[in-house]
């Protein structure tokens, strides 16, 4: 277990946002069922996306990581092959969800998908029920709706199904991708409150780039899928607002100034909301030709932020609120309890350890921020990469800094996180 010692620092400088994890996953999944070779340009090479690379290989794809990670070449089989071993997704919930549905497209046999301890606590029953509605045999080995998951191949022959959208939009994304290769047109009805809608938009955008066809209603509750040939020669991966959010927070909390390149809003990204949030809380945000510049100015509280569609922002917005005088409420994120960890309860607990009033409620956190924080504590991260990175940047603004456990978890989504902080002048030491 690696720890990071964070000392008070002001961040200044220029960095490039890492490639998007969400878009890398989606492009890999679609390339797996495409009719020809696809090149992913500038993909994210991190633990989570390598899990998807390995899952595609298990299903019969030839996947080559080239030019030191600057490109991934995917040559799909036709049809997908029954895996010769278990598909181990590691800590990647996106891989588990997307490849569970893709596994139904193998020509025969059974696929088994599992992962680490955290993955085996991530809900899967809504997706399994939806797959069964399409005539697919899919179940949990423990009969409790959690991995390990077994899926029988043979294709998708059904015509309609329903899925609960209140736990994760990844269930919907998974069905939208796999049903591109169904034998018949498919209708998907979504029950419950639909969360993380922008991630659904991202999935549909990539499907359409591959030539697929999806129509949805404005309320995100009904989807009509016309099976299509999927083909895209090259997919250029955008920069990741999710990872960049920690750099935004570092500038805000330390009163520094950071220019973040390789960011564009041309493709939908839920976590681009961090820019509006930082601006509302007092930061100066300037749009540039190749990204954004963020300068920490005053800190303003008194806000309620609905993160229904951006649940990955919960840890980073919470640490920003910790040093913002006044009350900040993070709401509509009950589904954040089902991420890599219970992000509502765990974030609130670690903030209280630092002396911040933080109350976990059913659907969010209520935070009464402070003018300054003493720090000098050791923060638990629950092996959650976003909690680890959030409290690292908060430590930059604490009088005595902080020590953060399990910083190696950042490699799940942002392998260059510590190096980028050092480039910006942060005084951090991994030991």
Image: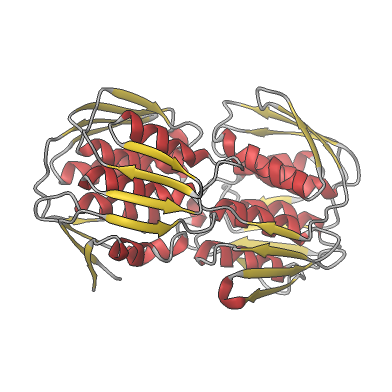
Pick out the residue farthest to the front: 289
Query: Residue 337: in sight, yes or no?
Result: no
Quadrant of residue 360 in the image?
top left
Q: Quadrant of the N terminus?
A: bottom left
Q: Is residue 282 above or below residue 75?
A: above
Query: Residue 375: in sight, yes or no?
Result: yes
Front residue (pair 121, 393)? 393
Q: Position of residue 69 (x, y in %)?
A: 57, 72
In the image: residue 62, left or right of residue 245: right
Q: Position of residue 196 (x, y in %)?
A: 54, 36
Q: Position of residue 202 (x, y in %)?
A: 63, 42
Quadrant of residue 383 in the image?
bottom left
In the image: residue 241, left or right of residue 366: right
Q: Is residue 114 above or below residue 300?
A: below
Q: Position of residue 409 (x, y in %)?
A: 39, 63
Q: Which residue is pictured at 39% across the width and 29% down the height?
A: 363
Q: Which residue is pictured at 79% across the width and 58% down the height?
A: 33
Q: Which residue is pictured at 38% across the width and 45% down the height?
A: 293
In the image: residue 63, left or right of residue 197: right
In the image: residue 393, left or right of residue 364: left
Q: Quadrant of the C terminus?
A: bottom left
């Amino acid at each position: 277990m690696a720890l990071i010692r964070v000392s008070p620092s002001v961040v200044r400088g220029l960095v490039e946002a890492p490639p998007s994890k969400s878009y890398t996953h989606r492009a890999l999944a679609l390339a797996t069922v495409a009719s020809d070779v696809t090149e992913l340009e500038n993909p994210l090479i991190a633990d989570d996306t390598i899990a998807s690379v390995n899952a595609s290989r298990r299903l019969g794809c030839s996947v080559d990581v080239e030019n030191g990670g600057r490109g991934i070449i995917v040559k799909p089989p036709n049809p997908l092959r029954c895996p010769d071993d278990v598909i181990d997704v590691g800590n990647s919930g996106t891989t588990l969800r997307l490849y569970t549905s893709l596994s139904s497209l193998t020509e025969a046999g059974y696929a088994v998908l599992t992962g680490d301890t955290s993955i085996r606590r991530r809900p899967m029953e809504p997706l399994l029920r939806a797959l069964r509605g399409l005539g697919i045999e899919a179940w949990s080995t423990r009969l409790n709706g959690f991995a390990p998951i077994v899926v029988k191949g043979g294709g998708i022959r059904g015509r309609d199904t329903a899925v609960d959208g209140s736990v994760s939009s990844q269930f919907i994304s998974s069905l939208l991708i796999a049903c591109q290769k169904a034998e018949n047109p498919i209708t998907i009805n979504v029950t419950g409150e639909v969360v993380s809608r922008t991630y659904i938009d991202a999935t549909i955008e990539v499907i359409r780039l591959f030539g697929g066809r999806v129509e949805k209603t404005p309320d995100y509750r009904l989807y009509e899928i016309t099976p299509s040939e999927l083909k895209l020669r090259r997919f250029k991966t955008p920069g990741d607002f999710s990872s960049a959010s920690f750099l935004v927070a570092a500038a805000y909390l330390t009163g520094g100034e950071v220019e973040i390149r390789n960011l564009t809003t041309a493709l939908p990204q839920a976590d681009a909301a961090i820019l509006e949030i930082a601006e509302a809380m007092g930061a100066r945000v300037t749009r540039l030709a190749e990204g954004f510049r963020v300068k920490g100015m005053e800190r303003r509280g008194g806000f309620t932020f609905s993160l229904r569609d951006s649940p990955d922002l919960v840890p980073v917005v919470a640490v920003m609120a910790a040093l913002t005088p006044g009350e900040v409420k993070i709401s509509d994120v009950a589904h954040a309890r089902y991420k890599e960890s219970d992000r509502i309860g765990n974030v609130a607990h670690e903030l209280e350890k630092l002396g911040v009033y933080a109350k976990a409620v059913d659907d969010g956190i209520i935070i009464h921020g402070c003018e300054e924080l003493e720090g000098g504590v050791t923060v638990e991260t629950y092996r959650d990469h976003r909690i680890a990175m959030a409290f690292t940047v908060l430590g930059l603004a604490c009088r005595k800094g902080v020590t953060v456990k399990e910083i190696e978890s950042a490699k799940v989504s942002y392998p260059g996180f510590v190096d980028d902080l050092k480039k910006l002048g942060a005084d951090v030491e991994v030991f």
